[in-house]
Image (tube, helix red, strand yellow):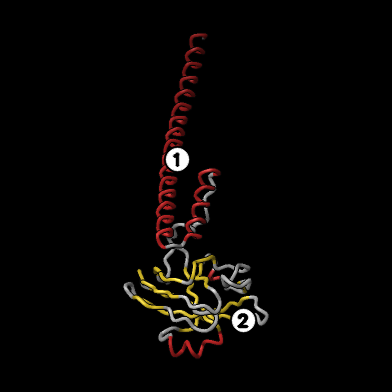
Amino acid sequence: MVLRLVMILVALTSHSFLYGDTSDASLNRAKIMYEKKVSEARKQLLAAYDKAIRKYTSRGEISRANQLRGERKEFLSKGIIPPSGSVVSLVKSLDATFVVSGTGYQVEEFSNGLKAFSNRNYKLDDIPRKFAGWRFTQKNGGDYADMKVNVTSDGFIYAAIQAESLKEAAKKMTGWILDQDAFFSYTSKKKERMVIVKRRFKAGDVFKVDQLGWTGTILLIPPMK
């Protein structure tokens, strides 16, 4: 009887040990796999940051490069992952990608409450939600800016002009059309309205941006894809 009880106890103990060991082994393998995937993703994200920072620095877009450096530093120190789309976006888009070069402007964040012009305290206002996360070519109000655009992928390019310049735009900006219900303003005494226009381009197209009116023509730059 005692022998039988001992045999049963040994069997139960062996059974529990066997299944417990298998469960732990499976769990450990899952942990190792998870840590490996996290490590690989971390390396890829840091590499993407480094590549983007080099690109924006080479373009002279220092404010954007510094912004990405700050995000990278926060990720390294706190492990905070930036919002998707700030570095890499996998969402297909109808927007073209392009490189803008020239003088008399700088690229800044296109958000309500930020300066519309380098030499004025007028603030951007009423920006449509569809342009959240975009940037723009900020220039001095009343001054000329020289902008050349090299299109790198097919799609629409967006620009903004003063509403008062629409007649002039119809003559000089051939092919550009109004973006439906898209406008914004800046906080001058008259709260001047800016209208957003767009035109489809193909990869390889190159064009100069006609500067119209006191505000000039502002290019709107989508988040990096």
Who's the residue at 56% across and 79% down the image?
A: 183
Indicate whether 28 appears above or below 140: above
Indicate whether 26 appears above or below 69: above
Residue 45 on image: x %, y %: 44, 50
Indicate whether 12 appears above or below 107: above
* Callout 1 amino acid: Tyr
Q: Which mark is residue 192?
A: 2
Quarter of the figure that contains the C terminus:
bottom left
Residue 40 on image: x %, y %: 40, 44
Q: Which mark is residue 85?
A: none
* Residue that sits furthest to the left in the current view: 204
Who's the residue at 42% across and 56% down the image?
A: 52
* Callout 2 amino acid: Glu
- The residue carrying pointer 1 sits among few (fewer than 14), some (14 to 19) or many (20 or more) residues within 10 Å by Cα, namely few
Residue 46 on image: x %, y %: 44, 48
Residue 186 on image: x %, y %: 62, 76
